[in-house]
Amino acid sequence: AERTQPTLTRSTCCYCGVGCGVLIESEGDRITGVRGDPSHPANFGRLCTKGLTLAQTAQSLTGRALYPEMRLSRESPRQRTDWDSALDTAAERFADIVRQHGPDAVAFYVSGQLLTEDYYVFNKLAKGVIGTNNIDTNSRLCMSSSVTAYKQALGADGPPTCYEDLELADCVLFAGSNMAYAHPVLFRRLEDAKARRPATRWIVIDPRRTDTAAMADLHLQITPGSDVALFNGMLHHLIWEGLTAPAYIAAHTDGFAALKQVVRDYTPRLAAEMCGILEADLIQAAEWFGRSPASLSLYCMGLNQSAHGTDKNLALINLHLACGQIGRPGAGPFSLTGQPNAMGGREVGGMATMLAAHRDIDNAGHRAEVAHFWGVPALSGRPGTPAVAMFDALRRGEIKAIWIACTNPAHSMPDLNSVREALGKAEFVVLQEAFADTDTAAYADVLLPATTWGEKSGTVTNSERRISRVREAVPAPGETRPDWWIACEVARRLEVLLRPAQLSRFGYATPEAIFAEHRALTEGRDLDIGGLSYAMLERAGPQQWPLPAGAAQGQARRYTDGVFAHADGLARFKPTAFQPLAEPTNARYPFHLLTGRLRDQWHGMSRTGRLPQLFEHAPEPSLSMHPLDAERRGFKAGDLLKVSSKRGQLVLPLQLSDELSSGSVFAAMHWNGRFLGSGGINETSLATVDRQSFQPELKHAAVRVEAA
Ligand code: SF4
């Protein structure tokens, strides 16, 4: 057969928020190789095992959704159909429900895996055409506690730091992050920095002795959920020992006196007791944090996925503000984004609690600005329904139709029995997906096949606010279409059905046209990218926001002048008090169940779960338990154990592990219905959410463990 010439395409890895640059090698319609892009400032050519195997996972069409499918009734299977029939049906059913029950009777549940351009049109479709703020995303399960805390403390969303700070910090505080597994390429950068500057101190706060914790100078193996007590205890010591920065506090912050009142109760001895650690270790952590020239904290789901996630974030930011450890090279609170484009989704306002370009739904002026820009009479001021409440409303029949794009809520949401009940009761479910064999696909009345990584173009924003291009390397397989195209097609149909006087605001020919519209909405905002274009990204490479018109490059760090994003320019101290876990253990459910990642798998494994070599590190699902707990109960390694919470159960083989404290068990989040007879560990998790961020407590549940 005639071979075509290999082509090299510059793009970005589709997995995590590190946002590594990749070079895709392709021949004809096949991706034949992927390697790290040496010129990308996130990874300088490095990739982790997931990124290195992107070519193999992209080559297989196993499990892919390749043609539109539709079913006429819940009793019949879906049948292949054509795009027009599928889109017409989906739009007509949505329009019918909106006419009968109002715009808030429908909802969109989208994904941090979508590109910024995809996200933008979905948000405009929901808020601008239908008139509902019921659009939320799986980023709600990921970063929303960080978002809420940044806004409250610093006045605006987004980390003040950049990746270069990893190399400049003298003290690195990891809080609830197994970075060695979750953000491996950034972790390599830290390891290199520590090798060059061995005096750098690493402190890891984690109830498990993870691979990250095993490399730390100090591991604080705290009782699950006790983070706020720890941070308050550290701050108490810093205040008492005169290690705070009074001049910085006076010039750049507000609320220190009230904070002092709260943390005075958290003596190091009491706080250490609450956390189950030694008082000397708490004091050591505080000393290193306060005395180091530059202290950086790196945090992730261990803080965010909690019923008190916002408080945990705020208590940590209080430490930074009190010590002036922010706005300087190597210093600052740095939330590590889980998904590749959770940040881009926030930028376009693709969530139930925000509007485009970091505007707020409850701000009438902001609503008017966006409505005017989109050419619609007004935007709804009714709050949208965040993820967990969205599926609750679907179960109760208040939301009647849901459009799910690029995510698998029947695996990733908490309390899966409730989620399955909701999807089963929904009047109409549309699933827009690259894969047809996810747990959620079983509930879809209409399945719309989407292109995926390697087949689509747009932009993503990584953890350091850096916008990178994602580029198409091979043609779309079957009848798959880009997510932005699908959203535009349904939007055009819904405009005709619902707003015939206001037509064709979705006539984009390319993702670049969508990017240009998004860019215009950011001008004058904190994330202003008025100076950024696809041409600049092509010419100068990935750029950090803000990058206003006229700027030669993006801004590496924020708040370097000590002026924060609140109207008066001052950062806010937010006093936070320790609160117990949403579901404490008890005699019937005596174990703390902790959840987390494996090194070589990604989320629901729809991509990584198809490659044998990615199972070498962890070949099968398991429940980890301390050997003493197992011995007391007569369990042996490999025994099948039933893990039950008040909500559900699953069966897993036992793995003995002294990485956990006695009284805790651990299971990875990835395994799902394709590997287990159930939806995975979220059979047991609870749907309690943080009252400020609406992020659920996915990291902890009380369980019992019995022989199966
Ligand atoms: Fe991809 Fe994240 Fe690995 Fe980089 S660290 S190669 S972005 S999965």
Image: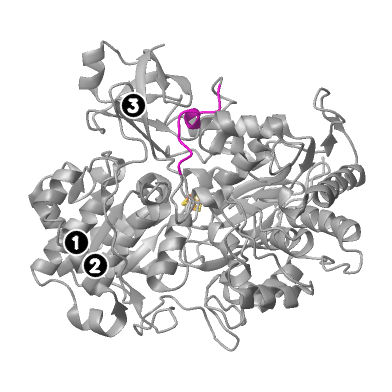
Q: In the image, is residue 683 part of the stretch drawn in magenta?
A: yes
From the viewer's perspective, tell me whether residue 85 is left or right of residue 26: right
Residues under labels 3 and 2: Cα distance? Answer: 39 Å
Q: Which mark is residue 263?
A: 1
Residue 214 at what x, y percent from top left? Answer: 24, 43
Query: Residue, x 57% and y 34% (percent of image)?
Result: 411
Instruction: State the SS at label 1.
Output: helix
Instruction: State the SS at label 3.
Output: strand
Whether tag 1 and tag 2 are in contact, CB under 8 A, the answer is yes
Is ligand 1 less than 8 Å from the beta carbon at label 3? no
Q: Circle 3 sits on which residue?
A: 624
**In this orientation, does residue 130 appear?**
yes
From the viewer's perspective, tell me whether residue 161 is left or right of residue 443: left
Q: Earlier in the sequence, mark 3 or mark 2?
A: 2
Q: Residues within 10 Å of mark 3 (few under 14, many from 20)?
A: many
Whether tag 3 and tag 2 are in contact, CB under 8 A, the answer is no
Tell me the amino acid under the disc marked 3: Ser
In this orientation, which residue lies closer to the viewer: 176 or 453?
Answer: 176
Tell me the amino acid under the disc marked 1: Val
Query: Residue, x 28% and y 72% (percent of image)?
Result: 321
Residue extent of the magenta highlight: 678-688
Tell me the amino acid under the disc marked 2: Leu
Label 3 vs label 1, nearer the camera: 1
Q: Circle 2 sits on which residue?
A: 259
Instruction: State the SS at label 2.
Output: helix
From the viewer's perspective, tell me whether residue 408 is left or right of residue 379: left
Q: Quadrant of the C terminus?
A: top left
Q: In the image, is residue 274 part of the stretch drawn in magenta?
A: no
Residues under labels 1 and 2: Cα distance? Answer: 6 Å
